[in-house]
Amino acid sequence: MIYPTAQDWQNAPHKRIALFGMSGLGKTYLSDMLRRTGNWFHYSIDYRIGTRYMGEHIVNNIKREAMKSPLLRELLRSDSIAIKSRIGFENLTPLSSYLGKPGNPDLGGIAFDEYLIRQRQHRDAEIAATIDSARFARNADEIYGYDHFIADTSGSICEVVDPANPDDPVLTSLSQTALPVWIKGADSHTDTLLERFRAAPKPMYYNEAFLQKTWNAYLAQNNLNPEQVDPDAFAIQGYASLLEHRLPLYAAMARNWGVTVEADQVTQVRDAQDFTGLITDAIGSTAG
């Protein structure tokens, strides 16, 4: 770890953290809170994915839909209108919409083969955006003059790394830049995440082997063809499996590459001083 002891962390003139874990447990809350202090640079990996690496895919997909309208088709062909994504730190809808959900097109689903293409694009984008953390950490200090740096990683980071491999290129780069910190949820948080997802199912990124297994099992269990699948129903069942699948991966990342804080502890953090204390305790527990 770049901070071998709690004292090293406390004395560091430039503190650098990379938060990871399931979305909804406090990564963005902490990042936003620290950014508002004026001393922390907030690097959102999902935002980087949706702009630098997936932006053209997103816009081209919107253009394909627009071309179905005779009016918009003519305006696009004559270069009379421009289409762009309004993605933001707190609005990742354009990225989610592009990823989509597989299943019946009449219910908003996309063909599974197309879904796989977009999943692979996301994997490549997430790897690149995570490795970009090192460059943004340097720029935060050297160009913008921020004292500290926090990377808000994608919830699917555990799907694009091998936490058991000491030479994993993504985790090696990230851990040389910042201290990876897992925000670990309790069983009650899992229930809350599931309830929230059932109310508003959203597209997710899956490890491809896990996705293929989950998709094939869903088709067999429900005796369905791919075109008959309700995209939301599959997403809900897939998300429940995904939570269970990711837990040991996050745990291995924290055990081999960083530290762990509890989601309940995160809700008690009100300012940068509280955050520094939270990480101090986490490093101390790991060292002990």
Image (tube, grey):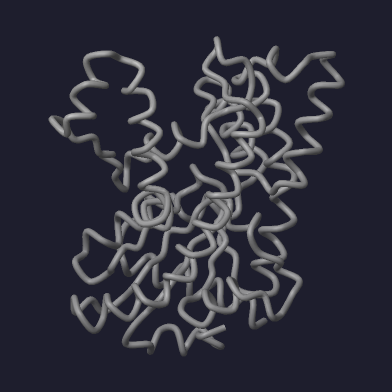
Q: Which residue is drawn at 42% across and 70% down?
A: 132
Quadrant of the image occupied by residue 123: bottom right
In the rendered image, residue 167, in percent from the top left (x then y), is placed at: 69, 80
**Of 64 and 46, the residue lying toward us:** 64
With respect to residue 108, does 244 lie above or below? Answer: below
> Along the horizontal axis of the image, is 76 left or right of 185?
left
In the rendered image, residue 4, in percent from the top left (x then y), is placed at: 56, 88
**Of 100 and 192, the residue lying toward us:** 100
> Along the horizontal axis of the image, is 55 left or right of 122?
left
In the rendered image, residue 161, in percent from the top left (x then y), is placed at: 66, 64
With respect to residue 273, does 5 lie above or below? Answer: below
In the rendered image, residue 140, in percent from the top left (x then y), is placed at: 27, 75
Q: Which residue is drawn at 61% across and 30% down?
A: 194
Quadrant of the image occupied by residue 277: bottom left
Quadrant in which the N terminus appears:
bottom right
With respect to residue 231, does 55 lie above or below? Answer: below
Q: Which residue is drawn at 17% across and 34% down?
A: 79
Q: Which residue is drawn at 66% across and 58% down?
A: 250
Quadrant in which the C terminus appears:
bottom right
